[in-house]
Amino acid sequence: MSSTSSLKKTTTRIFSVLLGSIIHAITINVFMNAAGIIPGGFVGTSLLVQKIFLKYFGINISYAALNITLNSLPAIFAFFYLGKRFVLYSIMFIVSSSLLVDLIPMYHLTDDIFLNVTFGGIIYGFGASLVLNSNACTGGTDFLAMIISHKTNKSIWNYVLVYNILIYVVYGSLFEFKMALYSIVFQVIYTAMINLGQTRYQRRTAFIVTQNPEPLADELMEITGHGVTVIEAKGQYTGEKRYLLYMVISKKDVRLIREHIAHNHPGAFLNITDSEQLIGKFVLEPID
C-alpha cells in the first residue's frame, strides 16, 4: 500500500471513529436523557451506576470516569487477542465519547418517549456501525463480542442482548420498570441497526458468466482475497461455451468487483445474492 493511500485510510478511520463518538454522545444527552432510558453494555452500566449514586447518595459521578474505568480491563484483554491498532482506535472512541458525554449539554429535542426511543436507537446504531466498519469497536461487551465473532466467524450481537437484559432488570427494580422496558425496545432497535449496518460479517455470493475466465478470476482473487470456482457451462440460447465464476465475498467487496467488472469486463454477466448460511472456511480480513 502506498504512503498516500495509507494516510487516506488512516485519516478516514480516525474521522469515522470521532464522528461515531460525537453521535454516541449526542444520542445519550439528547434522546436517552429525555426518554429516561439507558443502553446496554458498559455504557448502560456506567449510566446506571451514575443514576444510582445520584438518586440514593446525592453524588454526581463523572460518566467519563466510570466508563473509562469499566473499559480498562476489557481493553487490556482485547489487546492480547485482537489487533493492537484495533484496540487503540477503540480506546480513542471510548475516551472521546466519554469526555463528550460530560462536555455536551443535555437537551430535550422532544418529550415524546416513543420518538426518543425510536430515533435514538436508529441514530445510536448508525454511529456504532461507523465505528465498527472502521475496524474499531465501542468497548465493553463489544470487545468480547468482537473476539468471539472473530474466532467463530459468526455475528453474535443478538446474544449480547442477554447481558443487557440483566442491566434492565436492575434498572427497573431500582427505578421504574416502564423505563426499563422502553430501554429494551431501544436496545432491540440499536441491535437491528448494528446487524444491518456492520459489513464485516455480512457475506454475498457472486455469480459471473464470462467467455474469458482466467484473467477475470485472477483479478477478482487479487481484489477480494477470496477464492474463485470456475465452472464450464453453455449458453442455452446461443449454444456457445461459457464459464461460470462462483465466489463468496464480504459485503464491502461488492462495490469493488462491480466497478471492476463494469470497467474491465463489460461483456460479463454479474449476479450477486445474499449468503444466509455458510459452512466451511471463509477467510476474514484480520482485525487490526
Image (tube, grey):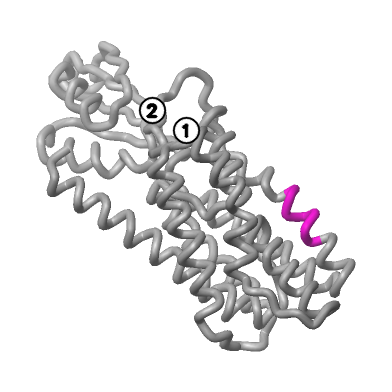
User: Can you give x and y, in whole percent of width and height, for residue 264 in the image?
Assistant: 10, 35
Residue corresponding to mark 2: 248
Residue corresponding to mark 1: 275
Query: Is residue 188 shown left or right of residue 98?
Result: right
User: Can you give x and y, in whole percent of width and height, for residue 60 in the image?
Assistant: 71, 79
Tell me which residue sits at (54%, 74%) in the image.
Answer: 101
Tell me which residue sits at (25%, 50%) in the image.
Answer: 9
Queried whether the magenta region covers residue 163, the answer comes back as yes
Is residue 248 or residue 84 the one in the foreground? 84
Instruction: Name the N-terminal-most of marks 1 and 2.
Output: 2
For the residues bearing labels 1 and 2, Cβ distance under 8 angstroms:
yes
Q: Determine the image quadrant of residue 14.
A: bottom left
Label 1 crowding class (10 Å Cα cut-off): few <14, some 14-19, many 20+?
A: some
Magenta segment = 162-168
Q: Secondary structure at mark 1?
A: loop
Identified by mark 2, the residue type is Val
Q: Secondary structure at mark 2?
A: strand
Query: Is residue 267 shown left or right of residue 75?
Result: left
Marks 1/2: CA–CA distance: 8 Å
User: Can you give x and y, in whole percent of width and height, for residue 97 in the image?
Assistant: 50, 67
Is residue 249 or residue 8 the one in the foreground? 8
Which secondary structure dominates the residues rendered in magenta?
helix
Query: Is residue 40 shown left or right of residue 16?
Result: right
40, above or below 58, in the image? above
Tell me which residue sits at (43%, 41%) in the image.
Answer: 200
